Image (cartoon, rainbow, N blue to C red):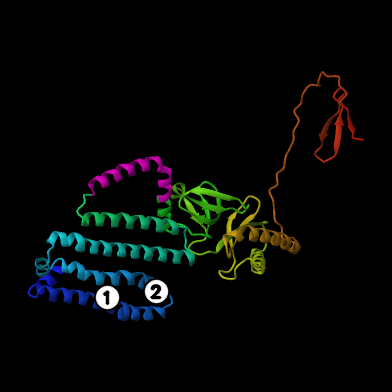
Amino acid sequence: MFGALAASLDGLPAWQATALVVGASLLAAFVLEFVVLRFARRLVAGTETRFDNVLVEELRPPLVVTAALAGVYLLTQLPAVTQAVLFTPEDLATFFGRPSLSVILLVWAYALNRVVNRVVEGMNEQGSRFDFAPVFSNVWTLVVLVGTVAAILSLWEISVEPLLGAAGIAGIAVGFAAKDTVANFFGGIALYFDDTYKIGDFVVLDSGEKGTVVKVGVRSTTLLTRDEVLVTVPNSVLNAAKIVNQSAPQHRKRVRVPVGVGYGTDIDEFEALVVDIAQEESLVLDSPKPRMRFRRFGDSALEYELLCWVRSPTQEARATHNLNRAVYKTLGTEGIEIPFPKRDVTVEYAAEAKPKSTSTAAVERVADGGTRETVDPSTGDDRPES
């Protein structure tokens, strides 16, 4: 682009080309500042989001500076100007061309860093899923800094290969020294992009821990259990573990309450009664409606399961408690039996010789009729217990 402009101005005298280029640059900067950007600020002021305001505010300085300094760089490329001044083309590039491009690079790098950092901070203030705002800001700042330094060194024709080699060796050393920290960091990044969970979700780990996610940091995730205990788990462990998120995709939780009823019970009446109990419970949602399911014929009872929903996984234990109490009381009042396993035990005595011991200690024996008798081991006489 600059070559085409230089060719179009090649036929003009040096002073005319200089005045034209400088005037065009200043005019472009003036139009951007007082016309284009002012209109853009008014346009984004009426939107609901503030991210477009951040974009316009932060890109204003680099746009204006680029428009103003572009003419300085273009002058160093015009043959008419380079032949009319006492400086050589290399001197013009050293004192005017490269400094102007370096300033443009620095201004754009600063603006891009500010845009990303402000956007990340705004998203974090609105309630981010992860507490990764400082991480992303620091990583982005590092990337912009390294990229800008490399671009400026390349512009000034300074070889960056020795620096890259040293940086590679330093990176390997740091990687070995902090491999656990690096694993936790990338584990957290993977959890973020996989959308495994967010702050406020109730999760269950394959190791048995379960609780509400209260913090997700660079190195670890913190869970708050139902016992009000904080459990900190490294992100690398979570990234390799099986995680059950009971708050996703919806926050409500299904509750299963097993109920047994005796054989011979009117199951229609029993099912309607238990469903009514669930509908009267304040923790149980009206939609989906509670329902009963006949699971199997048990050894001692007809095994049912009450299915209902609560608003949050943290309400499951309390809702189960309330439903169990209500079912037990109501079935007892209605005379419906909740059976329990029963076993008949028969005791048989083998015919044995009388013991040789002359001890007068009594041996208790429970007769089939349920009365208690004592046996004198020396005589074998049965005497009722006094």
The quarter of the picture where the C terminus appears is top right
Which region of the structure is painted magenta?
160-185
- Residue 264 visible in the picture: no
Q: Which is nearer the eye, 282 or 354? A: 282
What amino acid type should be assigned to the residue bearing mark 2?
Asn
Q: Secondary structure at mark 1?
A: helix
Quickly name the residue at label 1. Answer: 29
Considering only order in the chain, which callout, 2 or 1, is on the residue closer to the N terminus?
Answer: 1
* Residue drawn where x is 34% and y is 63% of the image: 110
Q: Residue at x 40, y 46 (%)?
A: 182
Residue 23: horizontal and vertical position, in percent? 21, 77
Q: Main secondary structure of the magenta part?
A: helix
Please provide percent x and percent y for residue 309: 58, 64
Membership of 174 in magenta stretch: yes
- Residue 364: quadrant of the picture: top right
Left or right side of 345 for 129: left
Q: Is residue 196 above or below residue 31?
A: above
Residue 215 appears in the figure: yes
Q: Position of residue 289 (x, y in %)?
A: 58, 69
Find the distance from the CA under tag 1 to the CA under tag 2: 20 Å
What is the quadrant of residue 310 in the picture?
Answer: bottom right
Q: Is residue 92 left or right of residue 108?
A: left
Question: Which mark's residue is nearer the viewer, 1 or 2?
Answer: 1
Q: Which amino acid does the dot numbered 1 rest on?
A: Ala
Which label belongs to residue 41? none
Magenta stretch encompasses residue 278: no
Question: What residue is disc 2 on?
Answer: 53
Dividing the image into 4 quarters, which one contains the N terminus? bottom left
Residue closest to the eye, 333 or 337 = 333
